[in-house]
Image (cartoon, grey):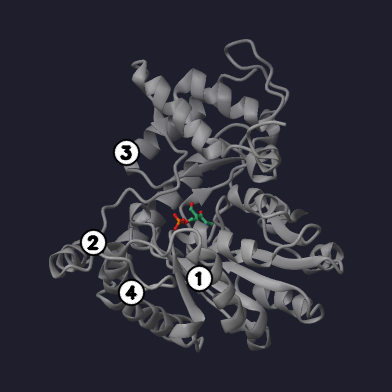
């Protein structure tokens, strides 16, 4: 009998973390590396939020909190859903966890039984399938091709639903593609879900505030109010408030599900950091001016990267609506030979040769379930992005 749990054999390491570490190792060896692999804003947490945390420490808010979160934060979350999404939730229908990732994990742990299926549109955030597998469920992938801007289409969704389907995980704007669903696109999906009342919706709205141009964000329970009773709407402060290290995510949904998640959390973490929760109250209730600054910077970077990549031999890069990722195709580079003499057979070969040859770290699409593509995070300075895109152009130009 082995010492380690069999559950570990069901999961893979995060490709994003592996590549970010490889880039760090190369940097430590003195190589000039530009890392476009990390998924966090390069901005600092706004000062008003930091001050709220410092004030909470000074007031002595340094003890355990109720498992589901402090009342002022649960009230602020309820207000946020009403104000921004037109959704009515009582504070008792909300829960605060240690990052958005932990919210999803709690929801799956509280609901999945062996054999339960979870529909995961691909490309997907690397953690969804692994979390489903760790909780004993089976991820069922539905390909969302570049032809459809990486968005789930109603027919393949309908075909993927079986009597065992428990959840579908939706993520708009998406990590890794940046694709976001318009009202009409979301309605086409919710129309299918209305025909299958046993399927619950877990919507990961983590990038809600990072959309560009005149795109208008929508969330499933807002588009189809009849789904309210079987939707868990997840969100968090990590991306929109540059608070990745504070570890605060939250969700709202039917009270019986929230209670089950509270039950799980009570035997896991006992609730997340009191200080971070007070900071999150300020994030949600305080001034939102920083968002305009973040959005403007990200939009400029998106436009720069998409334009430069589309001027690159063998690459095609769709223009995403949100988040801080692009997901270009490198299909035309497959079969070509890199300067090292290695033939590029997969998108993983492409990113690995790119890192070795030009010192640019990106993440291969196959780790997100759909390739041959690669993900670039543009949450870094314009100068670094321009340099990185020039290097990618040089690398592609050198393929024979
Ligand atoms: C789509 C998506 N959901 C959730 C998360 C996790 O957020 P948190 O850092 O709050 O756990 C991420 C982080 O990369 C993400 O990209």
Q: CA separation, marks 2 and 4?
A: 12 Å
Picture coordinates of residue 164 (x, y %)? 83, 65
Q: Residues within 10 Å of mark 3 (few under 14, many from 20)?
A: few
Q: Which residue is mark 4?
A: 284
Picture coordinates of residue 271 (x, y %)? 41, 65
Point out the tag, 3 or 4, that comes first from the N-terminus: 4
Q: Secondary structure at mark 2?
A: loop
Q: Which residue is mark 1?
A: 215
Nearer the observer: mark 4 or 1; the answer is: 4
Picture coordinates of residue 244 (x, y %)? 37, 54
The answer to whether mark 3 and mark 4 are in CB contact below 8 A is: no
Q: Secondary structure at mark 1?
A: loop
Q: Residues within 10 Å of mark 1 (few under 14, many from 20)?
A: some
Nearer the observer: mark 2 or 3; the answer is: 2
Identify the residue at the far front of this view: 1
The answer to whether mark 1 and mark 2 are in CB contact below 8 A is: no
- Quarter where residue 315 is shown: top right
Q: Secondary structure at mark 4?
A: helix
């Amino acid at each position: 009998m082995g010492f380690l749990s069999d559950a570990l054999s069901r999961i893979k390491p995060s490709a994003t973390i592996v590549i970010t570490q490889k880039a760090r190792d190369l940097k430590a060896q003195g190589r000039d590396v530009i890392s476009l692999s990390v998924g966090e804003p390069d901005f600092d947490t706004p000062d008003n939020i930091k001050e709220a945390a410092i004030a909470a420490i000074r007031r002595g808010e340094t003890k355990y909190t109720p498992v589901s979160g402090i009342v002022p934060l649960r009230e602020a979350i309820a207000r946020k859903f009403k104000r921004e999404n037109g959704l009515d939730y009582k504070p008792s229908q909300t829960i605060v966890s240690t990052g958005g990732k932990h919210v999803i994990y709690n929801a799956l742990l509280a609901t999945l039984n062996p054999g339960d299926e979870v529909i995961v549109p691909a490309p997907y955030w690397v953690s969804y399938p692994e979390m489903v597998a760790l909780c004993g469920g089976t991820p069922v992938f539905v390909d969302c091709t570049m032809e459809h801007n990486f968005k789930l289409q109603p027919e393949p969704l309908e075909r993927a639903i079986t009597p065992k389907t428990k959840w579908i995980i939706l993520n708009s704007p998406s990590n890794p593609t940046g694709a976001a669903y318009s009202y009409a696109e979301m309605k086409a999906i919710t129309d299918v879900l209305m025909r299958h009342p046993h399927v619950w919706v877990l919507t990961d709205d983590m990038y809600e505030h990072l959309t560009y141009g005149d795109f208008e964000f929508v969330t499933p329970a807002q588009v189809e109010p009849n789904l309210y009773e079987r939707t868990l709407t997840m969100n968090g402060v990590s991306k929109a408030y540059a608070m990745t290290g504070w570890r605060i995510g939250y969700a709202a949904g039917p009270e019986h599900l929230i209670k089950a998640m509270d039950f799980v959390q009570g035997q896991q973490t006992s609730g997340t950091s009191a200080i971070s929760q007070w900071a999150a109250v300020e994030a949600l209730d305080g001034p939102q001016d920083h968002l305009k600054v973040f959005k403007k910077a990200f939009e400029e970077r998106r436009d720069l990267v998409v334009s430069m990549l589309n001027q690159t031999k063998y690459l095609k890069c769709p223009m995403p609506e949100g988040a801080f990722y692009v997901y270009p195709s490198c299909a035309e580079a497959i079969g070509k030979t890199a300067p090292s003499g290695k033939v590029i057979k997969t998108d993983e070969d492409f990113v690995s040769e790119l890192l070795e040859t030009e010192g640019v770290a990106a993440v291969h699409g196959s780790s997100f379930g759909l390739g041959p593509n690669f993900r670039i995070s543009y949450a870094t300075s314009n100068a670094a992005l321009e340099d990185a895109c020039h290097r990618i152009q040089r690398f592609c130009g050198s393929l024979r």
